[in-house]
Image (cartoon, grey):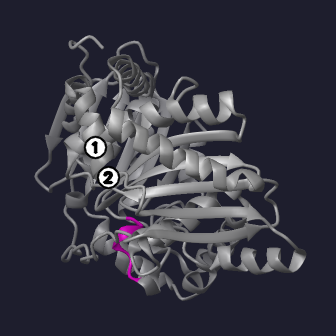
Amino acid sequence: MNRTHRLLPAHTYCLSNGLGVILHPIPIADSATVDVWVRTGGRNEPPEWLGISHFLEHMVFKGSERLAPGELDRAIEGRGGIANAATGQDYTHYYMTVAAADLPETLPYLAEAVLRAGIPDQEFEQEQQVILEEIRRAADNLGYTAYQLLMETAFGVEHPYGRPVLGTPASLMGLTPELLRAYHRGWYRPEFMTVVVTGGIDPERALALVEKEFGGSAGGPGWIAPPISPQPRPQGVLRRESAHARAEEARLKLAWPTVSLDAWEQVCGLELLAVVLGEGRSSRLVHLLREQRGWVRAIGCSSLVLKEGGLFCISAQLEVEDLAQVESTILHEIEKLQQDGIGQAELDRARRMLTHELLFSAESPSQLASLYGYYETLVGVQRLQEYLELLQAFTPAQIRELAQQYLSPQAYVVALLKPAASDAAAASELQLACR
């Protein structure tokens, strides 16, 4: 990467009410994206309110005292725009993309819905059923089920990160409109929010528009994130298996506890390590296990980093009879890297892949807005530039040290999703996946 690459917002502000604002004009863009990020998600939910952040995300689209259900969608989609939302463990965000000229007419609708969600009683039960169906569909999704099995195994059901963001049927049925309104009042406040606007905008006009729609003060006190226990670290090999009726092959996930976003330098190094081991055909595990030996249909590595925890993950799809030799080979390759290190060419390839991946993800207004909002909400948008610079600073010896520090062949987590052996087993495991 050329060190002159810059990926920082053109304009950042903090309004008098505590709201963060990020503006990035793209002169050639005809569209504009607004992305509203709220610093709450599954991590802030007590067990009895599991799924409340995601439920509230749905209810925001049901309007306010001044906005009828569906009116937000009609105002945006009627102008050819799109609107959507997503909930994670550490955030919730709402975004729309419209023609830049339509921004002054559409932003008031988004602001009204997000800031003053009414949570109407008559819409509550209907949306409850929608989310229950979403949970049922998720239980049929092999990727989701394997991921949730890993998180539950690695963090435990007592830890927020080990629980599903969607909630469970039981927790969902325990929620009420009053609880959602209280949760909204406590978290959907300017001091817990960032508004990102990108695309064909004039920064001064965009700032004035954001101030007009989001510049008010919230009533009452804000809520405080509850303390959570430290991330568990296995003392040996912690293994959990499940079966799924839809699975035709095994899905194997190995994971090692790592660091939270606070340890930013190590976060960047672990990303490089993940690319060296398992991203792209020339990476070590892909080349050996898929291209050479044909033992896996797919394999990859990733570094999952959350606000208060992290996992280094290796995931594979393979036949059940190959499970033992694939796991053993993965551990052998890790030990080999720990002993012999990596070459400069491997590190250079990883740098290029991560740098280009980040730069390519910022090519459209919507991608750029999501990138800025995510970073600002979780770790601070200034980390974007630090990320690009740190990728260049790591040496092969430092990557080897990270592997030695975090990837113990004697202490890790295994989550295994296998084909169901019988209809009875399938029904039992599907019920487990929904809980």
Q: Residue at x 65, y 50 (%)?
A: 325
Q: Position of residue 305 (x, y in %)?
A: 35, 51
Q: Quadrant of the C terminus?
A: bottom right
Answer yes or no: is residue 221 visible. Answer: yes
Q: Is residue 361 above or below residue 243?
A: above
Residue at x 43%, y 23% (from the top left corner)? 353
Q: Give residue 393's position: percent from left, percent from top.
A: 19, 25
Vertical comparison of 244 with 286: above or below: below
Q: Nearest the camera: 422 or 15?
A: 422
Q: In this orientation, which residue lies closer to the viewer: 404 or 271?
A: 404
Decide which of 406, 77 is in the foreground and name it.
Answer: 406
Q: Does any portion of residue 271 appear in the rendered image?
A: no
User: Are the residues tagged 1 and 2 within 8 Å (C-beta)?
Assistant: yes
Q: Secondary structure at mark 2?
A: helix
Residue under the point 66% across and 73% down? 433
Where is residue 262? Give x, y as percent.
20, 52
Residue under label 2: 406
In space, the residues marked 1 and 2 are separated at their CA atoms by: 6 Å
Check if residue 12 falls in the magenta segment: no
Q: Please provide the residue range marked out in magenta.
A: 41-46
Left/right placement of residue 384 relative to residue 93 reads left
Q: Is residue 91 left or right of residue 138?
A: left
Residue 126 is left or right of residue 207, and the answer is right
Q: Secondary structure at mark 1?
A: helix
Q: Amino acid at mark 1?
A: Leu
Identified at 34% across, 64% down, the residue is 40
Query: Residue 402, labelled with which disc?
Result: 1
Residue 145 coordinates in the image, percent (x, y): 64, 63
Q: Is residue 23 left or right of residue 99?
A: left
Q: Residues within 10 Å of mark 1 (few under 14, many from 20)?
A: some
